Image: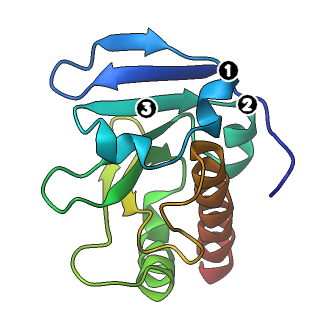
Amino acid sequence: MEKHFPIETIERCHKETEAVIQKETGDFLSRSVSYLKENTEEFLYIESPAFEAIRIDALVLEIDDVFQTYTALFGLGLQKKLREPMKSFLDANLQGDGIQYSMLFSGDDGVWDVNVTLNGMEGFDETLTLEQAVQLVVRFVADLVDAAKDGN
């Protein structure tokens, strides 16, 4: 896969309370992404300085309790006026049945709250490690940002 990028924070958190269960080291990301399916009451909160380049501050990975899909959640620092090119990119690049994404602009923060299914991303499968899943999301978001800026 790609070269490793620096991870500042990895926290396993409880979905109900958002309490930190345990802080992890980068080695934790060598586990299979299926860890999330085996621990549905948890989500992973990840911070990396590499996220700044794609305009997100942190990434959450979890299993969607209703649809049983792998999900990435993040705040995306793009202007509200870029809604249509963002939507076009997501519609064209997420495959599968059911809801593949949601996005809501938060005027207070000036960021998009984005929720996308990893299952809908090209190249995703349950044999990936958590690190590979993070890299997949990073590439996907970088492409989304480029498409949104080009489409404006």
Q: From the viewer's perspective, is the residue at label 3 or at label 1 nearer?
A: 3
Residue at (26, 84) in percent of width and height: 97
Q: From the viewer's perspective, is the residue at label 3 or at label 2 nearer?
A: 3
Circles 2 and 1, Cβ within 8 Å, touching? The answer is: yes
Secondary element at image label 1: loop
**Crowding near pointer 2: few (<14 within 10 Å), some, many (20+)?**
some
Q: Residue 81, image x and y in percent?
A: 46, 67
User: Where residue 49 is drawn, which disc sits there?
Assistant: 2
Residue at (57, 44) in percent of width and height: 130
Amino acid type at circle 2 is Pro
**Crowding near pointer 3: few (<14 within 10 Å), some, many (20+)?**
many
Residue at (51, 82) in percent of width and height: 93
Question: In this picture, is 39 found above or below 144?
Answer: above
Secondary element at image label 2: helix
**Disc 3 and disc 2: Cα gap in Å?**
17 Å
Question: In this picture, is 145 found above or below 107?
Answer: below
Which of disc 2 and disc 3 is earlier in sequence? Answer: 3
**Residue 98 in the figure: left or right of residue 148:** left
Q: Which residue is labeled 3 in the image?
A: 44
Question: In this picture, is 29 found above or below 65?
Answer: above
Q: Quadrant of residue 123?
A: bottom right
Question: In the rendered image, which quarter contains the C terminus?
Answer: bottom right
Q: Quadrant of residue 140?
A: bottom right
**Residue 152 in the figure: left or right of residue 68:** right
Q: Which residue is labeled 1 in the image?
A: 8
